[in-house]
Amino acid sequence: MTTLTPSEKALVPFVSVDNMMKLVHHIGIEPMLRGLAEYIEADFRRWELFDKTPRVASHSAEGVIELMPTSDGEVYGFKYVNGHPKNTADGLQTVTAFGLLANVGNGYPVLLSEMTVLTALRTAATSAMVAKYLAPKGADTMAMIGNGAQSEFQSMAMKAICGIKTVRLYDTDPAATAKAARNLSGLGLDVVACTSAEESMEGAQIITTCTADKQYATILTDNMVGAGVHINAIGGDCPGKTELAPAILHRADIFVEYPEQTRIEGEIQQLDADHPVTQMWEVINGTVKGRTSPEQITLFDSVGFAIEDFSALRYVRDNINGTDLFIDLDLLADPDDPRDLFGMVQRAAPA
Ligand code: NAD
């Protein structure tokens, strides 16, 4: 057992991938997704006090590397994340990430964590937290289009938080669908493997698109989407990378995280810059309505925002306390005399 008390050497707790996986099993995947959703929802409620900026993106022909900072005035956080759709063909993850929390008062980091697994968890928790407000009443079936790394997390969060019972899987690569079906078996969902996007959408009130392609793709065409569904669009999250036909966007009521970032990266990059969108934090606060009729098409144009990562890191910090699921990193030079950095280096000379 270790505690997160300040140590003499200003050591920084670090959560490795191995320890993050242990934390998932220690808490349980569904309670952890629910816990993350609660933290994210709590931070959406205090949205206005956060320091917010669209993420800082460095684009290349192959993908993007991004930094996502925010602060609530007491704690600062950032995530480093990449998105490289071609990576899976080389046996690499499309998305990898790590992140940090720091004390605003003295600038010292208080947590460093892997965030590849945590991003999948927080993205899924955010999707389900939003669907709780927007999906039609009694929704029990989700189409899951794109069966890559995020897909099982998305499915489990919709089960844990929205109570869906059936997930209908589709991917252009049948091996991805087979993998997701295998991973989800025995976890309390009815899992149906489908051979087309249309088939996956039969009877689904929630449609999740979570594909990866660095282009304006059309995963859903206008005629595929009927009235009264909630679309959870996850994969369009970069300039030039979208999943939905523009006509769907004109029929849907669109809900976003942070409009300044979503207009650059989300499905709505295909629309005029003044096309009306609703911010989710206002729905959660009750100042703006979410779903207003059973026939309405609601669309969560998710791109992933820094506050969700901040919430996820807060959750990890609170939940590793008192466990041995982290190691202390000697990350900060912290001489006894703060002005004697050079002397500290000299004293470290080999005898
Ligand atoms: P992944 O590469 O592991 O999986 C993507 C899957 O999509 C693959 O199995 C691929 O075969 C499938 N696919 C590609 N084109 C398709 C099509 N036309 N129809 C059906 N399936 C298709 O990627 P991942 O880690 O699961 O991420 C999926 C997407 O989600 C990426 O675009 C990623 O950038 C995005 N993402 C968004 C957020 C967010 O917060 N919004 C967070 C994480 C990831």
Image (spheres, grey):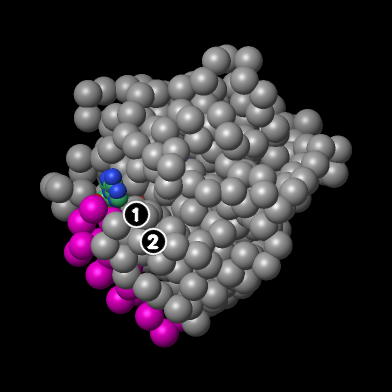
Residue lying furthest left: 90
The residue at 41%/84% (across/down) is 186
Q: Is mark 2 within 8 Å of ligand 1?
A: no
Q: Estimate the spatial distance between the alpha carbons at disc 1 and disc 2, rounded to whole Å.
A: 5 Å
Give the percent coordinates (x, y) of residue 245: 42, 33
The amino acid sitting under disc 1 is Ala
Would you say residue 134 sits in the magenta stretch?
no
The amino acid sitting under disc 2 is Ser
Whether residue 101 is visible to the viewer of this picture, yes or no, is no
Residue lying furthest top: 273
Read off the magenta span: 171-187
Give the percent coordinates (x, y) of residue 335: 53, 37
Q: Is mark 1 within 8 Å of ligand 1?
A: yes
Describe the element under mark 1 as helix, strand or loop: helix
Q: Provide the major secondary structure of the magenta segment.
A: helix
The residue at 67%/67% (across/down) is 138
- Where residue 151 sits, quadrant-wise, is bottom left
Whether residue 62 is visible to the viewer of this picture, yes or no, is yes
The residue at 62%/71% (across/down) is 163
Relative depth, front residue between 252 and 40: 252
Disc 1 and disc 2 in contact, CB within 8 angstroms: yes
Indicate which disc residue 200 carries.
2
Q: Is residue 74 left or right of residue 252?
A: right
Give the percent coordinates (x, y) of residue 39: 69, 54
Would you say residue 174 sits in the magenta stretch?
yes
Q: Which residue is mark 1?
A: 197
Describe the element under mark 2 as helix, strand or loop: helix
Q: Is residue 306 left or right of residue 332?
A: right
Q: Quadrant of the C terminus?
A: top left
- Where residue 43 sits, quadrant-wise, is top right
Relative depth, front residue between 164 and 92: 164
Instruction: Tell me the crowding category of disc 1: few under 14, some 14 to 19, or many 20 or more residues within 10 angstroms, Cα based.
Output: many
